[in-house]
Amino acid sequence: MAAKPKKAPVDVEKLTKAQAKVELMRLALEIEEHNNRYYQDDAPKISDAAYDALRQRSNAVEARFPELVTKESPSQKVGAAPSGRFAKVQHAIPMLSLGNAFTDQDVVDFVERVQRFLKLGADEIPTIVAEPKIDGLSLSLRYENGELVRGATRGDGTTGEDVTANVRTLSDIPHKLKGRNVPAVCEVRGEVYMLKSDFLALNKRQAEAEDTIFANPRNSAAGSLRQKDPSITASRPLKFFAYAWGEMSAMPAPTQFEMIEWIDKAGFVTNPLTTRCKNVEAILKFYREIETKRATLGYDIDGVVYKVDRLDWQQRLGFVSRNPRWAIAHKFAAEQATTVLNDIEIQVGRTGALTPVAKLAPVTVGGVVVQNATLHNEDYIKAIGNDGQPIRDGVDIRIGDTVVVQRAGDVIPQIVSVVLDKRPRNAKPYEFPHRCPACGSHAVREADPKTGREDSVRRCTNTLACPAQAKERLKHFVARNAFDIDGLGDKQIEEFFTDGLVMSPVDIFTLEKRDARATKKLADREGYGATSVRNLFAAIEARRKIALARFIFALGIRHVGEGNAKLLARHYGAVENFRAAMIAAGEGPLAEAYLDLNSIEGIGAVVANAIVEFFAEPHSVKAVDDLLDEIEVQPAEKAKADSPIAGKTVVFTGSLEKFTRDEAKATAERLGAKAAGSVSKKTDYVVAGPGAGSKLAEAQKLGVQVLTEDEWLALVNGL
Ligand code: IVH
């Protein structure tokens, strides 16, 4: 059947105001959907040209009806919405891939192939450089006269994406090459990656902010590098290993190994495990050493790469299709194993989310015994993905199933597939509980405030009295980024909560007083002694004074992660102001306090509503007040009212090179200025970095003062 022809859109010039309003909303939704497909899923549905046309139409409608421009408009969004996508970059020398070896024999064959091709004698064995194969994404960095001029992703190998502004934020990447005799053109290539520990910490922060969770360090590195807003990349802990090169106007060394030494001296980080091997035995020994070290390296690798050392030989060997004849990747066995799913346990989180966890018959995956695996949510068990599309070919997961388990990116075990042939006859589809296993209250799937779709997460509705939520909130309260009390971690909270010693945050601060009167003392508990109890009380004492941002974060309000807590602290200054304003904001969406909360740059309606909801609950306010009777919350650094930019509105645009966008905004706010996302008549300054586009043009049109990064720095220097 032929596709239904689409109605031609009404000419912008002919739209009535009412039509324009609807059209802008439609365009905003469509643009948002394509942004998500492109940035989050890496799977665009339309061409770049079609995408640009949507944005142009939206801009044209807004130009006719400027009064219809809202904060939600694609033209106003800071960061997420691009003014065009990444520019394309032609690689001067293609970025190729490597052939694979899986067995020792494949490696023997590789070395023999090299010998045959070069017509070497049987005892003339080529020296091979061996190094770990980093599981990240490859990047090419071009330096002209020693200066970094471009960073590009691999793309399809011939054409990559220009990510220059983003790569400049990586501390492993020099902006200027060191040493004398640097060739006029140098392209250094390597892998962008994320440490496993950094990946886990980032995911934790993302979860707290209810933001995208990455499946593994590789995805997380890729997602972080390919951000349209370089300040987001800057806030992500990305690292870089240099291991190859592209165009070079002169070669500084005659061998692979010496080239890597040169690259290292030029200011890059190269992999310290890189080793010269004299024969196949040495190569295979290296492979096994790396395989045993793999789990302790701190970053993911998926094999070892072998490269012929002599560059003149690399030259002669050349390429077969897209792989060099002079190099090969020796892959590690996939970290997968098959086991039986014995049960599905439901855990209840701090915000009431019911998370299913697979209880597996213990199995070794890549050298580690796995007994639990994440099942994410109800839909995941039913084989429905985030986008509503089937996953695992639509095969659901049932208790009793034989499943294939994988350690994703070496860290979190996941179930990748179900072995249907082995499904027990009586296995029934899993029925996700509709009641909270901890308190028996209804557990519901709300509408996601961002998308309007049914949320994939089912939540216990008994926010206040559910013991599981209360316990998780306490764990959050004492966590490292919150009250950070030495000697009071998850384990102690579990015990104290179960025994009724600590049921709400204030109980932590009355523990010592109550213990003095108690018949069964803490010091008599198993695993405790006089010293550990004294230390614990001292640690609690030390936290009676706490910074406002930490305090707000510790409350565990939904959507209020560390970043939002800082914004709130800086805006309200003192805890009394914050408390009073949040209660006042509950009077309604038109209340001045609510509008003020919503006006904070970075705090949107979803976050604002979550805070208001928290303070609308007398029980929460009482918990806060009880706590405030025991502790002293220190005011946040107030914005300086006497600075020359106090009360001014500043817009930062372009790819900032001298500071990150977050830094700049923080400075502006500290000095009492407002950092805004869009240029209007009310804007006092526009600070424009390289590549500034529409906002700069707008500023010039409106006669707003434009500053370079240096001028901005001069203005705020020393304040
Ligand atoms: S050399 C001409 N060395 O593996 C080949 N690649 O399958 C140049 N990779 O796209 C690549 N670690 O992203 C090389 N030590 C290493 C590597 C490495 C990871 C990646 C790289 C490349 C892919 C090839």
Image (cartoon, rainbow, N blue to C red):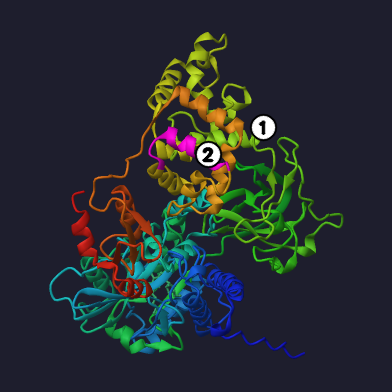
Answer few, some or many: residues within 10 Å of disc 2's Cα (few below 14, many 20 plus, some between 14 and 19). Answer: some
Residue type pointed to by label 2? Ala
Say above or below: 444 vs 515.
Answer: below
Between circles 2 and 1, the one closer to the viewer is 2
264 vs 515, left or right, is left
Relative vertical location of residue 543 with respect to residue 351 in this rendering, above or below: above
What range is drawn magenta here? 572-587
From the image, tell me which residue sits under label 1.
Answer: 465
Q: Main secondary structure of the magenta part?
A: helix
On the rendered structure, is 383 left or right of 183?
right
What is the x, y in percent for residue 319?
40, 87
Q: Position of residue 202 (x, y in %)?
A: 46, 53
Pointer 1: residues within 10 angstroms few (<14), some, or many (20+)? few
Say if the magenta span includes residue 541.
no
Secondary element under disc 1, as helix, strand or loop, is loop
Residue type for callout 1? Ala
State yes or no: Cβ of the residue under disc 2 lies below 8 Å from any atom of ligand 1: no
247 relative to 459 in the view: left or right? left
Which quadrant is home to the N terminus? bottom right
Q: Earlier in the sequence, mark 2 or mark 1?
A: 1
Residue 409 appears in the figure: yes
Question: Distance from label 2 to label 1 (Cα)?
Answer: 25 Å
What label does residue 584 carry, if any? Answer: 2
Could you tell me residue 401's position as x and y percent?
A: 76, 56
Q: Is residue 583 magenta?
A: yes
Q: Are marks 2 and 1 in contact (CB under 8 Å)?
A: no
